[in-house]
Image (spheres, helix red, strand yellow):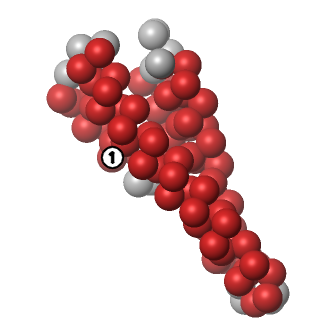
Amino acid sequence: MLKIFKIIAILEGISYLVLFSNMLFIKPTHIEVYKMLLFPVGMAHGLLFVSYIILASILKFQDNWSVKKWGIIVVASLIPFGAFYIEKKQLKNE
């Protein structure tokens, strides 16, 4: 389960960055490309984010994570590059 969580964390982080780059770099210059990418990338990110939170909650109980560790993992998912930090720093010993 942890291996799946690590993969979801990386994919969620990538989708988050793709959404940001779409908003910051593509929208101002190529509005049609922006509109075309927004729904599929947004949907993928939403599904990955929900999967990330659900898997983190399951692993909290399965691997006996502390509330602090679980909280850091959940909050990091809201920050760009946070999922990459979690995958490398918080989950490296597991």
Name the residue nearer the viewer: 2 or 13: 2
Q: Is residue 57 left or right of residue 78?
A: left
Tell me which residue sits at (42%, 24%) in the image: 90
Q: Is residue 38 left or right of residue 66?
A: right
Name the residue nearer the viewer: 29 or 41: 41
Tell me which residue sits at (50%, 58%) in the image: 46
Q: Is residue 6 left or right of residue 33?
A: left
Residue 13 in picture, x, y percent from top left: 58, 47
Name the residue nearer the viewer: 43 or 74: 43
Outermost left residue: 67
Residue 5 in picture, x, y percent from top left: 50, 28
Q: Is residue 75 visible?
A: yes
Inspect the image, locate mark 1, and give the three-letter code of the amino acid beneath it. Answer: Val
Q: Residues within 10 Å of mark 1 (few under 14, many from 20)?
A: few
Tell me which residue sits at (36%, 38%) in the image: 54
- Image height of 51 relative to 62, above or below: below
Tell me which residue sits at (62%, 42%) in the image: 11
Q: Is residue 16 visible?
A: no
Secondary structure beneath dot 1 equals helix
- How many numbered marks are there? 1
Residue 64 in picture, x, y percent from top left: 24, 14
Residue 2 in picture, x, y percent from top left: 48, 19
Image quadrant where residue 71 sits:
top left
Image quadrant where residue 94 sits:
top left
User: What residue is disc 1 on?
Assistant: 75
- Image height of 53 relative to 57, above or below: below
